[in-house]
Image (spheres, rainbow, N blue to C red):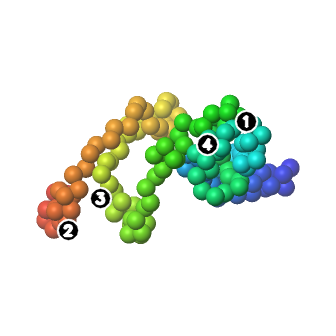
Amino acid sequence: MKKQWLKVEERFFKSIADGPTHRCYCCDRLDMKKNLVSYSKADLRARGFTEEQIAIIFSVELDEADFCKTCSDHICKRDVPNLEANYGFRYPEQPSCLSELNDLEERLVALRIPFMQIRELGRDRQYGIKGSVTNVPNDLHKSVDCLPRNVNDSATI
């Protein structure tokens, strides 16, 4: 019994370590590898797609790509997915200087700061997020102008 538990635990930690690191070719979302479905241009032709639709879905010269469940459902219905990256939904490239920032520095240069309500979820004293997320705009110039702060200006006791 203990051996089975160790195998299950090992699989669990392996799946967490892998995480959602695989990208859907169509909508650019991150997902787990097991949740992606692979399609080729030949598969789409067999499903009745026109060459124009295939050119929209496969914008680069690839013969096969991985698609998330949502995009795969659209493909099964012979539709071009709504969130197709070629429709302008592709994420912009991240500058190399931003990848070197730590968590605090990311918050300082963020254009929006998300606020959430964390409340008790019942008698067992667990906490959770309640309500919606409020995005508060952050004036970057004010944040940068007030740095670095003196210890006397920190307003702490």
Whichever of callouts 3 and 1 sits on the residue coming sooner in the sequence is 1
Q: Nearer the viewer, residue 128 or 157?
A: 128
Q: Give me the C-alpha separation between circle 1 and circle 4.
A: 12 Å
Local crowd size for mark 4, using a 10 Å CA cut-off: few (<14), some (14–19), many (≥20): few
Q: Which quadrant would the C terminus be assigned to in this image?
A: bottom left
Whichever of callouts 4 and 2 sits on the residue coming sooner in the sequence is 4
Helix, strand or loop status at disc 3? helix
Q: Residue at x 52, y 47 (%)?
A: 85
Q: Residue at x 50, y 38 (%)?
A: 126
Q: Residue at x 13, y 62 (%)?
A: 153
Q: Give me the C-alpha separation between circle 4 and circle 2.
A: 55 Å
Amino acid at circle 4 = Glu
Q: Nearer the viewer, residue 42 or 144?
A: 42
Local crowd size for mark 1, using a 10 Å CA cut-off: few (<14), some (14–19), many (≥20): few
Foreground mark, 1 or 2?
A: 1
Residue 117: image x %, image y %? 37, 37
Q: Residue at x 36, y 60 (%)?
A: 106
Residue linked to disc 3: 108
Amino acid at circle 3 = Leu
Amino acid at circle 1 = Gly
Foreground mark, 3 or 1?
A: 1
Q: Give me the C-alpha separation between circle 1 and circle 2.
A: 62 Å
Residue linked to disc 2: 148
